[in-house]
Image (cartoon, rainbow, N blue to C red):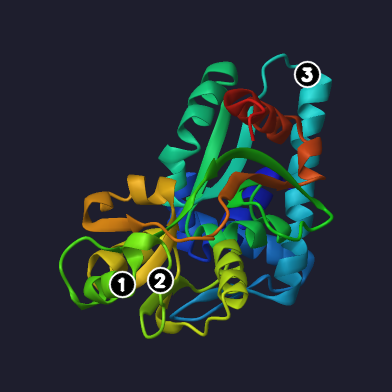
Amino acid sequence: MEIRALSVFLSVSETLNFSRSGELLHMSVSAVSRTVQRLEEELGQPLLERDNRRVRLTGAGREFRAYARHAIAEWQQLRRKLGNDEELAGEVSLFCSVTATYSVLAPILEAFRITHPAVEIKMHTGDQADGIGRILEGRDDVAVSGRPSQMPRRMEFLPLLESPLQFCVPAADCAVRDMVLAAGADGGDIDWSGIPFIVPERGITKEMLDAWFREQGLRPTIYAQVAGHEAIVAMVSLGLGVGIAPQLVIEGSGMASRVKQIPVREGLPPLTVGLCSLGQRLASPLVKSFWDVAGQTYGSSV
């Protein structure tokens, strides 16, 4: 099997969209489709289920995806070894939230571009709560994430910075703001009874907030569960409830002036933000180089 064909299949297995993969690979949709069909014929198994509305992997497709990732990584490593290349070349797949691209990754990417100009960064963005899952599934090499309370054994975590987790309320006069002020926000001891919360629907900060609720003996009034800290800040700014978000997200959201951070006695601990990757992925010189540049960029202050 050709490495190029494996790369095409990997792209389709991730995007689940032939048109999108064609754009990313600079190929026509028909060429992408023919490549996948040839692989299916060679294997004697359908790798993808297709209908008019969606594309999804079959069981054989999921197994073949793991094989393709391994084969491509081995091929790239062999080329470097046989060619004795001094300059690294290839691709590193990253996952992070939109905010993290400029608040966390920007200095790393700049330093990495200078030291390894031939390495291509393949960036995917989304809810930071999905980062660890994508790493464990092998979908990306590296993800920006908060440090989990329970670290999966096969995953490595590189701490980069800490960001306080802030409680925030609408800055404009509204019913929610009045409720919080009436409940004692100025002194840090707040009666949260009846105050609506906008909370993360999943992820590390949800676990931290749930633990805080238990410690406070509080059964919160949940107005909404939201994917992504940026969306939480936006909903708070609209006067819909109280939310929590990392300081770096509030400052980078463009809505910092529309929310007000409030002091909370015995609040949440800061969120440790860093990179996570599978231990086996760090055996790749490409991934390890990115990891090392990140550590050098941020130092060992965390």
Q: Label 3, on which residue?
A: 83
Mark 2 or mark 3: whose residue is earlier in sequence: 3
Relative to 69, 255 lies left or right: left
Q: Residues within 10 Å of mark 2 (few under 14, many from 20)?
A: some
Q: Label 1, on which residue?
A: 180
Residue 290 image point, x, y percent: 64, 31
- How many marks do you count on the picture? 3
- Residue drawn at x 59%, y 51% is 145
Decide which of 170, 104 is in the foreground and name it.
170
Residue 37 image point, x, y percent: 62, 65
Residue 261 showing in the rendered view: yes
Say which element carries label 3: helix
For the residues labelled 3 and 1, the Cα–Cα distance comes to: 65 Å
Mark 1 or mark 2: whose residue is earlier in sequence: 1
- Residue drawn at x 45%, y 72% is 199
Residue 231 showing in the rendered view: no
Q: Is residue 203 above or below residue 27?
A: below
